[in-house]
Image: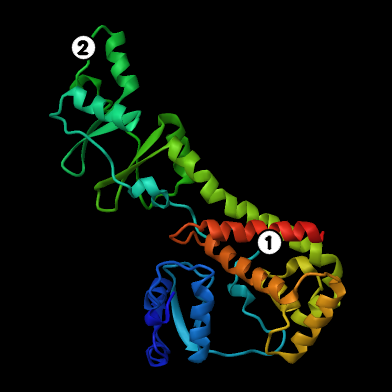
Amino acid sequence: MTDTRRPSSQELLALKGKTLRVTDLLAMFGERARNFHNVPVIERALQEAGLDTHPSFTTCGLATRMLVIAHNIGPAGEEEADEEVQPGILPQQSFKIGDIPSARGGVFSVKSTAPLHTATYTMRQKNYSQIPVIDGMAEIKGVITWSSIAARYEKGEVPTLANAMVQDSIPMAEVHHDLFSRLPELRQYGYLLVRDNNGIFVGIITGDDITGQFHTLALPFFLVGEIESRLRLCLGPKLTGDPVRALKGPNHSGDFSKLMFGEYIKLLSGDQQNAGLRACADTNWASLGWGVDRTQFVAQLDRVRIIRNQIAHFDEEPLSPHEIDELREFSGLLKQLL
């Protein structure tokens, strides 16, 4: 992000009292999705303009409508934790068919007037197991598969496009459909033709697409879960009880496991405005007895928080290799501290 794309304080102040989507706010800064680079910049720009959003733009869904309000620093123990993604409940949004890249990546098809060899050539060239027969943009006639062609030969027939098409029970889905509810159908047929909301075919999902995406989709969740588990093991034994109550209030149970991820930072950060919390954080850090740099540790913990919120809402852009490395490195550091 560069300052040339950063809105002025006057432009930001003009938003006070208005509602806008997260995507609208990101667009003002020349961004399309949240990441650990742009979230701190946007947070700082809002704070400098004396503004905040409700709910917090850092944690709510991209399509959520937020109210732009005056920034208010509450007293000790008063948190916006209810807006943060709670531990153990990732993800926060259902995963849609359209979230798989190939679902919107276009679909190779042939017309019903084409000869069969046109279909099989494309299937061989692209290493496809099937190819739809579509007239126009949305009129599905059938699907040619290697299995359907073989079935014609088994019956002693010469296969043609017309007689080799599968025309019944063609598996189709729309981009807004829930992905996981359609997985049994995908497993049965091996593919799903995907329509946009206007009925036009825009892609196809196969079992290979799901397998190929599993690492990209699942690894961040596993790494974040591993980090949360190791944080509880590292911090819980030393900070349960009075340190937690100093943050949450005297009536709190003191149970470390009840804290939100962002509250881990408040327990340790020496760079917070509330003098009382800052003093408690100094004591908390000393009690850990770690030989690591405190400022770097807290900064990395905060970057993990931002990445965690990003993946919880299935932001449009997947995590970059650098962000994956951030999670791996921090998890590895925590393992050494156990």
In the picture as drawn, the residue positioned furthest to the left comes out as 113
The residue to which callout 1 is attached is 330
| Residue 290: x %, y % from top left | 83, 69
Look at 87% across and 74% down and name the residue there. Answer: 287
Look at 32% across and 47% down and name the residue there. Answer: 105
Look at 50% across and 79% down and name the residue there. Answer: 41
Dots 2 and 1: beta carbons under 8 Å? no
Mark 2 or 1 closer to N-term? 2
* Nearest the eye: 285 or 276: 285
Q: Amino acid at mark 2?
A: Val
Query: Does residue 248 show up?
Result: yes
Q: Is residue 169 above or below residue 287?
A: above
Q: Amino acid at mark 1?
A: Phe
| Residue 335: x %, y % from top left | 77, 56
| Residue 174: x %, y % from top left | 34, 47
Gap between marks 2 and 1, in whole Å? 62 Å
Q: How many neighbours does mark 1 have within 10 angstroms: few (below 14), some (14-19), or many (20 or more)?
A: some
Q: Quadrant of the N terminus?
A: bottom left
Q: Secondary structure at mark 2?
A: loop
The residue to which callout 2 is attached is 158
